Image (cartoon, rainbow, N blue to C red):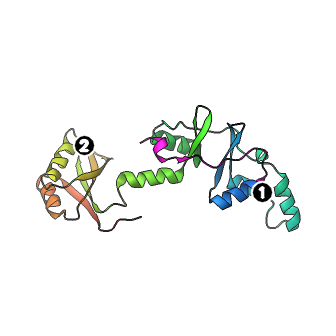
Amino acid sequence: MYVKNRMTSNPYTISPDATIAEALDLMRSKNIRRLPVVKNGKLVGIVTEKEMQEVSPSKATTLSIFELNYLLAKTKVSAVMTKEVITVSPDALLEEAAVLMRDNRVGALPVVQDGKVVGIITETNIFDAFIDLLGFREIGTRITVEVDDAPGVLANVAGVIKEFGANITHVVVYRSGGGKSNIVIRVNTINTDNITEALEKQGYKVTSVLKNNNSIQ
């Protein structure tokens, strides 16, 4: 899966010459927490709601509401934005974006192509992709099977399931150490008792069966 498949395309941006008040108004009206900062079509920074709150006077200040509004209306985005921006290409793998976010401790990456901001990828986008990859929202059954970490095991397990006409929609493999792995398989049916019995007869250990009768939005 690529960044372009999960990013928010054509994101809202703001000029470095805009004020903090303008940036906050835009974030709140569009329900977003970050804004790429663009000047003359070029990415020059990124600003977050948290950064602007940190430079805003605290609630304990003796300034009046008029003085507070004056400060917010005079302070420019360029004064608080992060100038060294980590970006990612729309053709990068989603895993690459996740690693960049994790290693650099950022919650979002502007997506840049040919010098232009074409999207933004956030932690929420990554979480949604993870949920979809596991098929958690879909009707069906999630079967976890403990197996030997050896060649051909996944094909054998899939062959057992195939005998019952069930369609495997999602597969994830977790290595648990000690020469063992857990295969998490989601099938498009709720009636899986015969499948689990057949797997156990083949010597596989079924550690979990989770049925989902309703599509979760």
Q: Quadrant of residue 131?
A: bottom left
First in residue order: circle 1 vs circle 2: 1
Seen from the viewer's position, the closer of residues 12 and 135 is: 12
Q: Amino acid at mark 2?
A: Asp
The reply to whether residue 70 is in sight is yes
101 relative to 71 in the view: left or right? left
Q: Give the residue at mark 1.
A: 21
Q: Amino acid at mark 1?
A: Ala
What segment carries the magenta color?
Answer: 1-21
Q: Position of residue 196 (x, y in %)?
A: 17, 59
Residue 15 magenta-highlighted = yes
64 relative to 181 in the view: left or right? right
Q: Residue at x 67, y 47 (%)?
A: 13
User: Circle 1 — which element?
Assistant: helix
Q: Quadrant of the C terminus?
A: bottom left
Seen from the viewer's position, the closer of residues 24 and 174 is: 24
| CB within 8 Å, label 1 to label 2 | no
Q: Give the residue at mark 2.
A: 149
Secondary structure mostly taken by the magenta-highlighted segment of the chain = loop
Q: Position of residue 123 (x, y in %)?
A: 53, 51
Residue 6 magenta-highlighted = yes
The total of numbered circles placed on residues is 2
Q: Position of residue 2 (x, y in %)?
A: 45, 40
Q: Quadrant of the N terminus?
A: top left
As drawn, the residue found furthest toward the top would be: 114
Q: Residue at x 68, y 55 (%)?
A: 49
Q: Residue at x 48, y 39 (%)?
A: 96
Q: Quadrant of residue 116?
A: top right
Q: Residue at x 82, y 51 (%)?
A: 75
Mark 1 to mark 2: distance in Å? 57 Å
User: Circle 2 — which element?
Assistant: loop
The reply to whether residue 63 is in sight is no
